[in-house]
Image (cartoon, grey):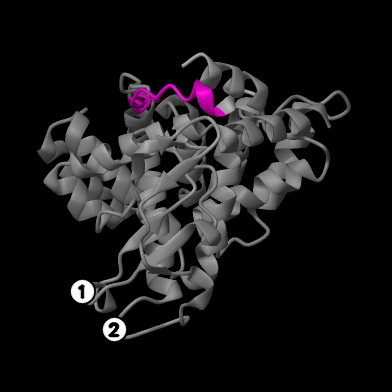
């Protein structure tokens, strides 16, 4: 209960800090515009993020530019031309997972109420994602995501037990359950839907542990929340779409960081395609273990203009009368 209250406190503080939220939105706009060409190709169309007004941002209020858009719930499930739930779900998942892996930035609140489709004559044909309510965003070091990526590799290789052991490292120890028992419960959750996507199976394993009172460590709570929201988009997505989105984000990161030569990475991908993940699991895990976090850049708060001195506006009427009589 204490952990849940602390998480709620953190969420409320993040939602009410408008200066910080404006800085995060400005930072996200700059990052999206500065992505290299291969990142734009793999991540898809750059999302639209409404800009906060440079003047009307303060501790009590934040005004953003208005952008005409269509809510997710108001879109058709499918559409040959123009926005649909399926197209917007793909964009929301692509952008969220790409920012997580490539830019080490986490949006813990990517539910459908915060993701709209931009209106306009061109957007009637080409869907563009509008992202809103970004106050909960926070840096997420790649080291924090490694256990989930390694669990996904183990699942693809057919080793649910190894995947469960990886997930075990991000949950809290239990006073009543042994690590072996927790691992077995997680593995059972992973195997509930063996034909499902890898990300969805990982979420199922974590939920199975939570049913026994085994919660994720506090520092992993927002990450689990984000993955649960992204898994919720699966209703409108092709099978294993979240897995492919993660792979595209990881590909862009490897192209940027180059832990191996480009030829070596292509050869690794080819062998994985021909012989399966199990044949190259050791190499994949080695690459993930060697990934280093990028230097964290804290969003800069907007520079607010000096406010006029309106002291007289708040003076009592008696003081105003006295001041007038002396003029």
Q: Which residue is denoted by mark 2 in the rendering?
A: 81
Q: Residue at x 60, y 26 (%)?
A: 219
Q: Is residue 77 magenta?
A: no
Across and down, in percent, residue 208 comes to 74, 48
The answer, for residue 5, to whether it is visible in the render is yes
Q: Taking 218 as reference, is 115 left or right?
A: left
| Mark found first going from the N terminus, 1 or 2 | 2
Across and down, in percent, residue 1 comes to 84, 32
Q: Quadrant of residue 104?
A: top left
Across and down, in percent, residue 89 comes to 44, 65
Across and down, in percent, residue 39 comes to 20, 46
Q: Residues within 10 Å of mark 2 (few under 14, many from 20)?
A: few
**Label 1 to label 2: alpha-carbon separation:** 11 Å
Residue 316 marker = none
Give the overall secondary structure of the magenta segment.
loop
Q: Are marks 1 and 2 in contact (CB under 8 Å)?
A: no
Residue found at the far right of this picture:
176
Q: Which region is colored magenta?
A: 299-313
Q: Taking 219 as reference, is 100 left or right?
A: left
Above or below: residue 54 compared with residue 40: above
- Comparing 243 with 269, the one in front is 243
Above or below: residue 92 compared with residue 12: below
Q: Residues within 10 Å of mark 1 (few under 14, many from 20)?
A: few
- Element class at badge 1: helix
């Amino acid at each position: 209960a204490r952990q849940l209250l602390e998480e709620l406190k953190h969420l409320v503080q993040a939602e009410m800090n408008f200066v910080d939220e404006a800085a995060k939105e400005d930072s996200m706009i700059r990052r999206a515009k500065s992505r290299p060409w291969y990142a734009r190709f793999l991540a898809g169309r750059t999302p639209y993020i409404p800009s906060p007004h440079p003047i009307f941002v303060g501790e009590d209020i934040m005004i953003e530019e208005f952008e005409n858009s269509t809510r997710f719930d108001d879109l058709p499930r499918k559409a040959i031309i123009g926005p649909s739930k399926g197209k917007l779900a793909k964009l929301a998942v692509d952008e969220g997972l790409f920012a997580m892996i490539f830019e080490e930035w986490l949006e813990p609140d990517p539910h459908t109420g915060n993701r709209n489709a931009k209106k306009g004559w061109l957007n009637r044909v080409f869907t563009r994602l509008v992202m809103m309510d970004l106050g909960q965003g926070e840096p997420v070091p790649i080291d924090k995501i490694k256990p989930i990526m390694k669990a996904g590799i183990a699942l693809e290789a057919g080793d649910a037990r190894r995947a469960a052991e990886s997930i075990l490292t991000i949950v809290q120890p239990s006073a009543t359950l042994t690590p072996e028992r927790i691992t077995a419960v997680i593995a059972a959750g992973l195997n509930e839907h063996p034909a499902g996507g890898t990300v969805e199976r990982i979420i199922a394993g974590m939920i199975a542990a939570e049913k026994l009172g085994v919660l994720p460590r506090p520092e992993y709570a927002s990450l689990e929340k984000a993955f649960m929201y992204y898994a919720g988009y699966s209703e409108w997505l092709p099978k294993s779409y979240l897995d492919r989105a993660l792979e595209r984000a990881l590909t862009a990161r490897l192209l940027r960081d180059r832990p191996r030569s480009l030829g070596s990475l292509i050869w690794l991908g080819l062998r994985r395609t021909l012989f399966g993940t199990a044949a190259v699991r050791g190499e994949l895990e080695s690459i993930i273990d060697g990934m280093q976090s990028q230097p964290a850049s804290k969003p800069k708060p907007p520079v607010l203009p000096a406010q006029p001195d309106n002291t007289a506006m708040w003076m009592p009427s008696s003081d105003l009368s006295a001041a007038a009589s002396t003029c």
